Image (cartoon, helix red, strand yellow):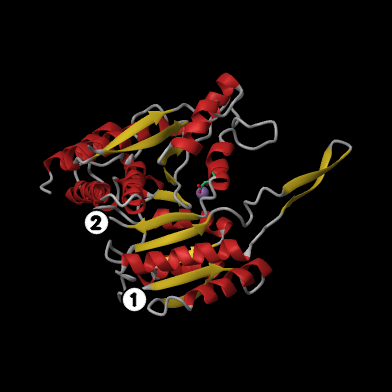
């Protein structure tokens, strides 16, 4: 009997509704090829569009299934434009869909946001002198506190906002668990940094100024003592942005507070070929939500042109994570097969969406979202295991 896994599938808004079905097709091809496990995807509508229609961001059923019953969650993107041409917002001014993306991170306590910055062979990078041999790091973004702690507000006087405050919270517990996660990942991945093969965890912070970052770094140092085989490394976040462009090959794993992680992973996405190439996994104890880093991109929606690879790679991360946490080798095998097939299609070069038709691949006619997913699924079917 194949082992079964319930997957909550939440395409959300905009291009989420195109890239998630594409990713699902690829995952199901891998399931069929590897066999021995069965994915049971259940799809729910959610996000800004759904809120416009119903006054809710998702149904109660969707919420209960996602939070309590699903083995893993595959999320697209949320954010819609309303009939007035403005972003759809909740009465509290938050983006409609916020309670899905951020709500899941907080309520399921998904403390590590894993964002691999890997340049695949065959993908253009804006860094002139760098190749796929230089760019292969993983940023671990703290995901439950920092500036994202929902302790914020405005002071209104006579109907006018006088000031607005966002409280940035860093706890010892939060710093410890995410640092441990990063060190463990570096050890598990073994390969080290591209430049020298050294396993290295870089703590990216602003501890020259901020108390929270000082606690973050002190805690990182405490955790590091349990991992003598991994090199310690430190960077202030402002300086790191230029090192990321100058010597990406120096980095293996990185760990950083929430809001810095948000910013530097978009920078990272740009050197790996853009947001269309950047997957993420939000991971807690036994719970995981996997999503592309990109948003709903309303202006590109409905044209079957968005790059599905970020969502497909997020799906591969989901299979890997399920394989490791549920101790199911078939899932791990399927995860590897998806990643390998993405790499093969990219290396081959012919089939790619518009966003990566540049540089050496400038003359290529862009393929649609569906065509790229089909090429990857075909590759999976033809693979020899
Ligand atoms: C991300 C996104 C989210 C974030 C938004 C949608 C709230 O930018 O996942 O990086 O800021 O974390
Ligand atoms: Mn972001």
What residue is at 47 percent from the left and 26 percent from the top? 45
Q: Position of residue 50 (x, y in %)?
A: 53, 24
Q: In which quarter of the image is residue 35?
A: top left
Q: Few, some or many C-alpha atoms within 10 Å of disc 2 (few <14, some 14-19, many ≥20)?
A: some
Q: Is mark 2 on a helix, strand or loop?
A: loop
Question: Image height check: is 202 above or below 17?
Answer: below
Q: Name the residue under label 2.
A: 121
Furthest-right residue in this view: 158
Q: Position of residue 242 (x, y in %)?
A: 48, 67
Residue 368 visible in the snapshot: no
- Specify the quadrant that holds the N terminus: top left
Give whichever of 299, 45 is nearer the camera: 45
Image position of 6 (left or right of 232): left
Q: Is mark 1 on a helix, strand or loop?
A: loop
What residue is at 23 percent from the left and 50 percent from the top? 333
Q: Where is residue 346 in the image (x, y as percent from the top left)?
A: 23, 48
Q: Position of residue 249 (x, y in %)?
A: 35, 69
Give whichever of 271, 331 is nearer the camera: 331
What residue is at 58 percent from the left and 20 percent from the top? 54
Question: Image height check: is 357 above or below 135?
Answer: above
Q: Mark 1 points at which residue?
A: 198
Furthest-front residue in this view: 1
* Mark 2 Cβ inside 8 Å of ligand 1: no
Image position of 69 (left or right of 304): right
Q: Which of marks 2 and 1 is in front?
A: 1
What residue is at 71 percent from the left and 55 percent from the top? 167
Q: Of the numbered discs in the image, which one, if any, rests on residue 282?
A: none
């Amino acid at each position: 009997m194949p082992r079964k896994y319930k997957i909550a599938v939440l395409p959300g808004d905009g291009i989420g509704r195109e890239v998630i079905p594409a990713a699902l097709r690829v995952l199901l091809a891998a399931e069929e090829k590897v066999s021995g496990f069965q994915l049971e995807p259940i799809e729910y509508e959610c996000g800004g569009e759904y809120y416009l229609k119903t006054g809710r961001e998702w149904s109660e059923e969707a919420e209960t299934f996602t939070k309590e019953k699903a083995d893993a969650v595959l999320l697209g993107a949320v954010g819609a434009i309303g009939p007035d041409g403005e972003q759809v917002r909740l009465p509290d001014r938050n983006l409609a869909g916020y309670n899905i993306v951020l709500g899941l991170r907080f309520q399921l306590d998904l403390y590590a946001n894993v964002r691999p910055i890997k340049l695949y062979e065959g993908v253009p990078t804006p860094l002139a002198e760098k190749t796929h041999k230089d760019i292969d790091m993983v940023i671990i973004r703290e995901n439950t506190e920092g500036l994202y702690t929902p302790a914020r507000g405005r002071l209104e006087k006579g109907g006018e906002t006088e000031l607005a405050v966002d409280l940035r919270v860093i706890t010892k517990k939060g710093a410890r668990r995410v640092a441990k996660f990063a060190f463990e990942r570096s050890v598990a991945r073994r390969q080290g940094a591209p430049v020298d093969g050294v396993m290295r965890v870089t703590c990216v912070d602003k501890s020259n100024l901020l108390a929270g970052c000082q606690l973050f770094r002190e805690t990182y140092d405490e955790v590091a003592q349990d991992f003598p085989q991994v090199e310690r490394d430190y960077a202030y976040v402002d300086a790191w942005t230029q090192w990321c462009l100058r010597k990406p090959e120096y980095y293996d794993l990185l760990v950083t507070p929430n809001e810095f992680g948000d910013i530097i992973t978009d920078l990272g996405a740009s050197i790996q070929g853009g947001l269309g190439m950047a997957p993420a996994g939000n991971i807690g104890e036994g719970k995981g939500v996997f999503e592309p880093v990109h948003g709903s991109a309303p202006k590109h929606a409905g044209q079957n042109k968005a790059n599905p690879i970020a969502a497909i790679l997020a799906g591969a991360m989901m299979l890997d994570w399920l394989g490791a946490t549920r101790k199911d080798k078939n899932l791990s095998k399927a995860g590897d097969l998806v990643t390998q097939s993405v790499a093969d299609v990219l290396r081959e070069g012919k089939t790619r969406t518009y966003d990566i038709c540049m540089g050496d691949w400038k003359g290529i006619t862009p393929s649609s979202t569906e065509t790229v997913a089909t090429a990857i699924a075909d590759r999976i079917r033809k693979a020899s295991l």
